[in-house]
Amino acid sequence: MSGDGQADLTALWHQHWPSCPPVGYKLRDPYRDVWVRFHSLPESKRYAEDEGEYAIVLERYNTVLDEMFAGADVYVVTPLWTTEAGVPLSQPFTGYWQSLLVEDDPDPEFCTYCHLFAARQPWRRGCIDEQLRDIADHKVAGVLITDTRMQRVHHPYDGGADVFLASSEERDRMRNRHGDWLSSHPSGL
C-alpha cells in the first residue's frame, strides 16, 4: 500500500472512529451506541467441538458479514503483534497500513506493537472462511473487516463477533434479526 493509501485509510478511520485506534477490543466502550455482540454457538458456547458446530460458527459469521457487506469491497485488517517498533522484514502480509504502540514500558523489551495490514477484496460469502475458522479456534486474533469507507466494522473473536454499525437504528435492526445469537448477560457480553 502506498503512503497515500495509508493516509487515506487513516483519515477514513479517524472520520468514523475518532475515539479509538483500529483495535477491535478497544472499540466497544466508546461506541456502545452502535455496537452489538453476537455469539458463535448456541447457549454462548465458546469453541466448536465438531464439524457440525464449525458449520454453525461459519454460518453465523457469514450471515452477519453478508448483511453488512454483500456486493461491496471490504478491507480485511490483520494485525501482527511484535516487540519491535519496525515492521519485521519477514512479515507474511501485504498492504502495510500502520503500526501502533499498544503497551508502553520503560524497558523496550516489554513494549508491544501492533502492525496492521489492510487487504482490499470483494466480499463474497465464504471468502475468508479459513481465517474465520482460525479466529474461532483462537489461532488468530484482532482481525477487523470493514467496508471501504470504514463506516461498519466486524471484529470476529473466538466465541463470536463484535459488530459496529453506522447508526444505532441499523444496530437495533441487526440485533433484532439475530436475537437468539445474543448473550443473556445484561451488558451484552
Image (cartoon, rainbow, N blue to C red):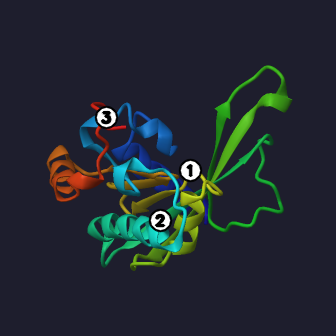
Front position in the image: 133 or 78 = 133
Q: Residue at x 84, y 23 (%)?
A: 107
Q: Determine the CA span between mark 1 and mark 3.
A: 23 Å
On residue 185, the disc is 3
State which tag comes first along the sequence, 1 or 3: 1
**Does residue 128 appear to the left or right of 101 in the view shown?**
left
Please name the residue that numbered disc 1 is placed on.
142
Viewer-nearest of discs 1 and 2? 1
Rendered view: 62 above or below 139: below
Please name the residue that numbered disc 2 is placed on.
75
Q: Secondary structure at mark 2?
A: strand
State which tag comes first along the sequence, 1 or 2: 2
Rendered view: 29 above or below 166: above
Q: Residue at x 28, y 51 (%)?
A: 165
State which tag comes first along the sequence, 2 or 3: 2
Characterize the local packing of mark 2: few (<14), some (14-19) or many (20 or more) Cα atoms within 10 angstroms: many
Three-letter code for the amino acid on which mark 3 is drawn: His
**Does residue 2 appear to the left or right of 104 in the view shown?**
left
Where, quadrant-wise, is the C terminus in this rendering? top left
Three-letter code for the amino acid on which mark 2 is drawn: Tyr
Rendered view: 83 above or below 104: below
Three-letter code for the amino acid on which mark 1 is drawn: Gly
Where, quadrant-wise, is the N terminus in this rendering? bottom right
Q: Secondary structure at mark 1?
A: loop
**Does residue 171 appear to the left or right of 154 in the view shown?**
left
Characterize the local packing of mark 1: few (<14), some (14-19) or many (20 or more) Cα atoms within 10 angstroms: some
